[in-house]
Amino acid sequence: MAAGAPDHARIPGTPATGTVVLLNGTSSSGKSSIARALLDVLGGIWFHMPVDAFHAMRCRRPIADENLRDEIDRTVKGFHRAVAGMAAAGNNVVVDHPLSRPWRLLDLLDLLAPEDTVLVGVRCPLPELERRERERGDRPPGLAALQYERVHAHGAHDLDVDTGVLSPRECALRIRDFLSRRLRPTAFEELRRTLAAPDVPARP
């Protein structure tokens, strides 16, 4: 835009990228409840972006079994880029998303600023996950068990919380307190060095 353009025609600048708090845990681990609690206890303006909200935007037309995986993958890739776009525009985002397939983490390592990303492991004992899954009734039976070993297989997190012993608010308070004293390198910085594809340059 030309220097003399009127204010209403100027694209707003972005003084800094936003912070991303990425809640990684199985289905029924309590990620969404923690995210809602975080919006109440964090200072400033934050957005909650759950991957389930993106799946809910899809039309109700049936999807053939042989096409379901590709459809889910396209949705998740779009979700990742929406999160990255929000953060790049200077917004603080709480992301509710299970890293249950390795490519999801690799994709996010490429998209998000690692120094501004806080990776939180949301943990819960499997028997409690299965109990919650039965009670909620809106998830395929066995989904939590299927994801249980996968979501944390990469190892490193900046912080872990256990919803088997902590309430959503207690988890949120721990995350809030951690944000004020987080150290470098972050888990995402470490994971970029160890997991990122060779052709993905490390961020300075």
Image: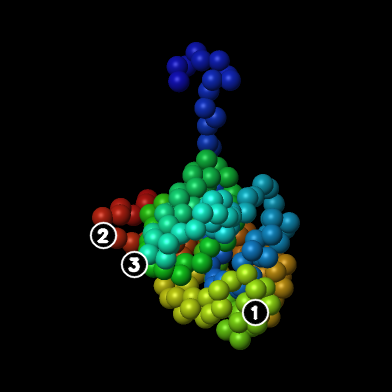
Residue pictured at 38% horizontal, 54% vertical = 110
Q: Is any atom of residue 156 visible in this view?
A: no
Of 53 and 71, which appears nearest the observer? Answer: 71
| Relative vertical location of residue 17 with respect to residue 72 in this rendering, above or below | above
**Pointer 1 or 3: first along the chain:** 1
Name the amino acid type tagged 2.
Pro
Q: What element carries label 2?
A: loop
Q: Is mark 1 on a helix, strand or loop?
A: helix
Of 101 and 185, which appears nearest the observer? Answer: 101
Quarter of the rendering occupied by the N terminus = top left
The disc at residue 194 is 3
Of 73 and 97, which appears nearest the observer? Answer: 73
Please give left or right for residue 83 compared with residue 199 in the image. right
Q: As drawn, which residue projects farthest toward the left? A: 199
Q: Can you tell which of label 2 and label 1 is closer to the viewer?
A: 1
- Between the residue at mark 2 and the residue at mark 1, the CA separation in whole angstroms equals 42 Å
Residue 159, image x, y percentages? 56, 70
Residue 126, image x, y percentages? 57, 84
The disc at residue 158 is none
Name the amino acid type tagged 1.
Arg
**Pointer 2 or 1: first along the chain:** 1
Name the amino acid type tagged 3.
Thr
- Between the residue at mark 3 and the residue at mark 2, the CA separation in whole angstroms equals 10 Å
Q: Residue 71: name its quadrant.
A: bottom left
The disc at residue 198 is 2
Q: As drawn, which residue projects farthest toward the bottom? A: 127
Disc 1 marks which residue? 134
Residue 84, image x, y percentages? 48, 49
Query: Label 2: few (<14), some or many (≥20) within 10 Å?
Result: few
Q: Residue 139: name its quadrant.
A: bottom right
